[in-house]
Image (cartoon, rainbow, N blue to C red):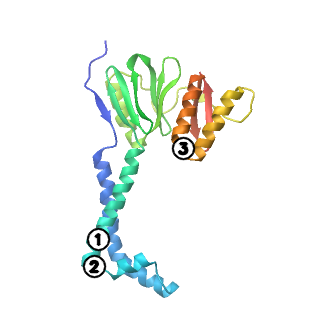
Amino acid sequence: MVKQEPPVTVRLPEAWLWVVILIGAGLGVGAAFAVGPVADGMIRLFDGAPRPLELAAALPLVWALPVLAVVGAAAGAWVAGVWRSENPVVEVRSDGVVVHDGAGGRHVARGQLAEVFTDGRDLVLRGTDGAEHVRTRVDSGLTEHLRSAFERHGYPWRGTADPHEAAYTVWVDNTPDLDEPAHALLRKRRRALADDRAGAADEAREELRARGISVRDRGKAQQYRTV
């Protein structure tokens, strides 16, 4: 019998995001001291400097410090926001797992899960039928948090490599080991990735999964395995 542990939610810690914001503010403070000499050097070398740099250099230090600190913090907040949006929120419960990411929310019941692991930068939830219910990008810094959450709830955590690593093949268009509809979907997904259309790439992945084909990315290449 599985012990009924309280749900555990794994996400980027707020403290990490604040560190990014504070680093941005610190860089802004450093820029306040550096902007004057940098602008002067550019004027001497190139007979001019970008207008924003000249305006920042013209500020008295007592104004430049808070202004550039705020600008740096705002830039840090933007970076932190992008970082957070690129990582999922994973709720691990005794009866199943809920993953929220850019593709929306997905629930996978406990009885459907056979393997949980990270594969490169991906978190993978693989079903009892061999198909991947979830494959989503996750920061490597969260791996230990994920391992702890899944093991605490008794899920089959398989570590930081795909147990079926040797079964993957680099996709080469028109090879005879796949039929034409599968090749067409892989072409569609390749174009979607090249055009940064994540939704279309996810749609092609789902269609491939329905055909019993798992796909993952390695650099600019797609790798697949049949289930």
Give the residue type at disc 1.
Answer: Val
Up-down: is 9 above or below 44?
Answer: above
Tally the marks.
Answer: 3
Q: Nearer the viewer, residue 11 or 51?
A: 51
Give the residue type at disc 2.
Answer: Leu
Q: Is residue 35 visible?
A: yes
Provide residue 127's location: percent of width, then percent of height.
Answer: 48, 21
Which residue was labeled with disc 1?
67
The Cα–Cα distance between marks 3 and 1, rounded to whole angstroms, is: 37 Å
Residue shown at 31%/54% (left/top)?
19
Which residue was labeled with disc 2?
61
Q: Of helix, strand and loop, which one carries label 2?
A: helix
Provide residue 20's location: percent of width, then percent of height.
Answer: 34, 55
Give the residue type at disc 3.
Answer: Arg
Which residue was labeled with disc 3?
197
Q: Quadrant of the C terminus?
A: top right
Q: Quadrant of the N terminus?
A: top left
Relative horizontal placement of residue 128, taking residue 89 as reference (left or right)? right
What number is the disc on residue 144? none
Provide residue 61's location: percent of width, then percent of height.
Answer: 27, 79
Q: Of helix, strand and loop, which one carries label 1?
A: helix
Q: Nearer the viewer, mark 2 or mark 3?
A: 3
The Cα–Cα distance between marks 2 and 1, rounded to whole angstroms, is: 10 Å
- Give the class, few, some or many, for how many residues have Cα within 10 Å of label 1's Cα (few <14, many ≥20): some
